[in-house]
Amino acid sequence: MNAEKPHILIIDDHADIRDPLAKYLSNHGMRTSTAADGVEMDQILKTAAVDLIVLDIMMPGEDGFSICRRIQDSSKIPVILLTALTDETDRIVGLELGADDYISKPFNPRELLARIKSVIRRTNMLPAKEHKVRGSAKFSGWTFDLSNKEIIGKDGISIRLSSGEHTLLVTLIEHEGVVLNRDQLLDLTKGREAQLFDRSIDNQISRLRQKIEKDPKNPEIITTKWGGGYSFNADIEWD
């Protein structure tokens, strides 16, 4: 990425929104491209490197939720949702699909610019994923079945994971051996709306340890590092 001029792709079916926004961002140090829908987005992504996508949710044809899902399945490009929706559930759906932030219409372009800079800065600070998690991971006598969101012990007994525990364990395994602090874990798991889902990363870690550690008070799989970080330290075999 060009650190001085990040490339921002604005996807909105209303030209009176996307074009002035593109001009504003260009005047404030960004390179911009625009698309009216997912088809135009696909064409741009084939030929250009994009650092962040600003994506409208309510569009005719393929909506923003579907486009966001496709982006997350095929790339690591961060997404900020533009939404006219005031229902908190709709915002949560977007974040659960992998969006990094959202802003409600009508919005102040200056606020959106600040959010874009924040997401890019935060994304650049996060460690890269070490593994693309698929199938099952075996570690410390456990088999972690990602498709069923459960862990299975040597005795064959399965233990269900909550959605939060599942997401957190996947994140830790993807960054095996890497120390992640609380803010990084919040960003990697739930983004800026983490408070809507979890009271704290520490509580989630504690619950995971109760399920997978032989001695939760002296953990060997998910260890605590000085300064408030956590690290996944078990050897993994992939199926």
Image: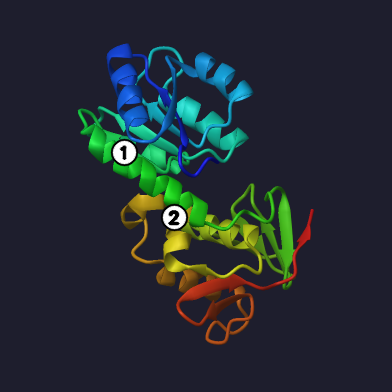
Distance from disc 1 to disc 2, alpha carbons, whole Å, reads 19 Å
Image location of residue 56, percent across then percent down: 36, 25
Can the viewer see residue 204 in this picture? no
Quadrant holding the N terminus: top right
Circle 2: element type: helix
Image location of residue 97, percent across then percent down: 47, 39
In the picture, measured across the screen, residue 26 lies left or right of residue 72, that is: left
Q: Quadrant of residue 155?
A: bottom right
* Amino acid at dot 1: Leu
Q: Earlier in the sequence, mark 1 or mark 2?
A: 1
From the viewer's perspective, is residue 111 above or below residue 214?
above
Badge nearest the viewer, 1 or 2: 1
Q: Residue at x 25, y 40 (%)?
A: 111
* Amino acid at dot 2: Asp
Identify the residue position indicated by label 2 in the image: 187
Near-viewer residue (137 or 233)? 233
Image location of residue 234, percent across then percent down: 70, 72
Near-viewer residue (30 or 77)? 30
Circle 1: element type: helix
Numbered circle sitting on residue 143: none
Q: Residues within 10 Å of mark 1 (few under 14, many from 20)?
A: some
Identify the residue position indicated by label 1 in the image: 113
